Amino acid sequence: MAEFAYKAASAGGGLVEGRIEARSRDEAIRRLVDQGLTPVGVFDRAAAPAAAAAGAAKPSARRWALGGDKPTRTEILALTSELAVMLRAGLPLDGALRVLLGMDHRPPVSALVSQILESVKGGTPLSRALAARGELFGPFYVNMVRSGEASGQLGAVLTRLVEHLERMRALRESVVSALIYPAILLSVAVLSVLAILIFIVPQFEQLFRDAREALPLATRIVLGAGQLVLGYGVYLLAGLVLGGYAFVRWLRSAPGQRWWQAQLARLPVLGRVRHEYNLARFARTFGTLLANGVPILTALGIAGETLEDVQLRDAIKGVAPKVKSGGRLAEALAATGSFEPLAINLVRVGEETGTLDKMVLELAAVLDRKVETGIKRGLTLLEPLLILGLGLVIAVVIVSILMGILTVNELAL
C-alpha cells in the first residue's frame, strides 16, 4: 500500500487536504469519490516532500511567477480543467468556483475567479460572466460554455473544451519548438560575422593601408564593413532597433498583416505548412463547436474569427451567406479555393451522413499530422541551408582577406 496526499472539494464547497492509503492513484481517487469528495489533486507521498519544500521555501515566488498582471493561457487552461473535474463530480458551480478561489493561484488568477464568482452569485450565467472578460476567453470559449449551459452538460462541455485547448496548445508548441534550432543557428551566424568584422578584420588594417587602392574589390568591401561596424556600430544598432520596432508596429496593422502573410504564403515549404496549420485550427474549432450543439452559421463565424490568416478569414466570411441561402457547405468551402479536395470530400460525407462534426474533427486530426510532417521536412531543408550559409559567409570574409594578403605580397615583390 502506498500513501497519497490529496486536495479535494467537499460537498459544501470547502477545500480539504489530507492523506490516504491505496494500491494506486486511481484507487485513491475512487476512495475519495466514495467518501463524497471531489479530487482536485492526488499525488504520491514519495514525491510530495520535495514539492512541498519548494512551495514552502518560496511561496511568494510561486505566487508572483512570470505571467504579468493577467492570467496566462496555461492558467486559463488549468482553471478550466479543474472546474470541469468538479462539475462532473456533481459540485454546484458556485461551490466549484469557491474551491478554485481557495487554491494556490497567482493574484491575477485569484482576482479573476473572485470576479466570476461574484457575478455567478448575483444570478449572471457563467457564459455572460466570461463574455465580460472577452480579452481572456474569446467568443469560442464563451459559446462553448453557453452551449453547455443550454444542454445542462456544462461539466462534459468543459471537458471537451479542455481537450480542444490542449490539442491547440500542443500544435502551437510543436511549431514554436521546431523553430528554436533554426533561430539559434541564425543568431550564431550573425554573431560570428560581427565577431569577425570587429575583432579579426581590424588586425589587417595596418597591413593593407598602403595598398588600399590595389586591393581586390572583395577585400575593400570587407575592410569597409569592418570600419563601418567599429565606427558606427552604436548608431547602426540604434537604427536597427528603432527600425525593427517601427516595422513590427506596422506589421500589426491591417495592411502590414496582409503584406506579411502574402510574403509567407509564397515561401516554398513554410507557406504550405502555415496554410495547413490555419486550416487545422479552423477545422478543430468548427468541429468542436458543432459537436456541442452550436448552430452551423454561428460556428462558422466563431471559427473564422479565431484565424490569424487574414486571407483565409475573409474567405470563410463568404461561406456563411451561401450556407444561409440554402447552399451546401462543401460547395461553399470549395468555392473559396482555400480547401484541398480531401477537406471538401470529408465535409461532403459529413453532410450526407449527418456526422459533420465528426468528419470535421477527423479533418483537423489529418491536418495536424500533415503540419507536423511538413515542419520536419522544412527543418530537414532549412538546417543544412543555414549551416551552409554561415560557412559561405565566413569563407567569403576569409578568402577576401587572403586575396588582399596575396596582393600585398605581389606588390612587395
Image (cartoon, rainbow, N blue to C red):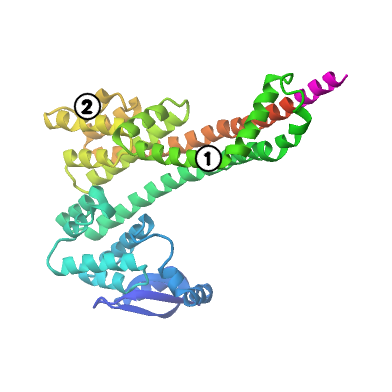
Q: Is residue 141 above or below residue 393?
A: below
In the rendering, at what x and y percent does residue 146 appear? 18, 54
Q: Is residue 198 above or below residue 104?
A: above
Residue drawn at point x = 25 percent, y = 69 percent: 114
Earlier residue among tags 1 and 2: 1
Q: Which dot marks residue 332?
A: 2
At label 2, which amino acid type do we have? Ala
Instruction: Decide if residue 175 is in sight here.
Output: yes
Residue drawn at point x = 49 percent, y = 36 percent: 375
> For the C terminus, which image quadrant?
top right
Q: Is residue 254 toward the left or the right of residue 186 in the image?
A: left
Residue 194, picture quadrant: top right
Residue 410, picture quadrant: top right
Q: Is residue 114 above or below residue 139?
A: below
Q: Residues within 10 Å of mark 1 (few under 14, many from 20)?
A: few
In the rendering, at what x and y percent does residue 86 appear? 29, 67
Q: Nearer the viewer, residue 76 or 10?
A: 76
In the rendering, at what x and y percent does residue 337 appear? 30, 23
* Residue 411 painted magenta: yes
- Range drawn in magenta: 402-413
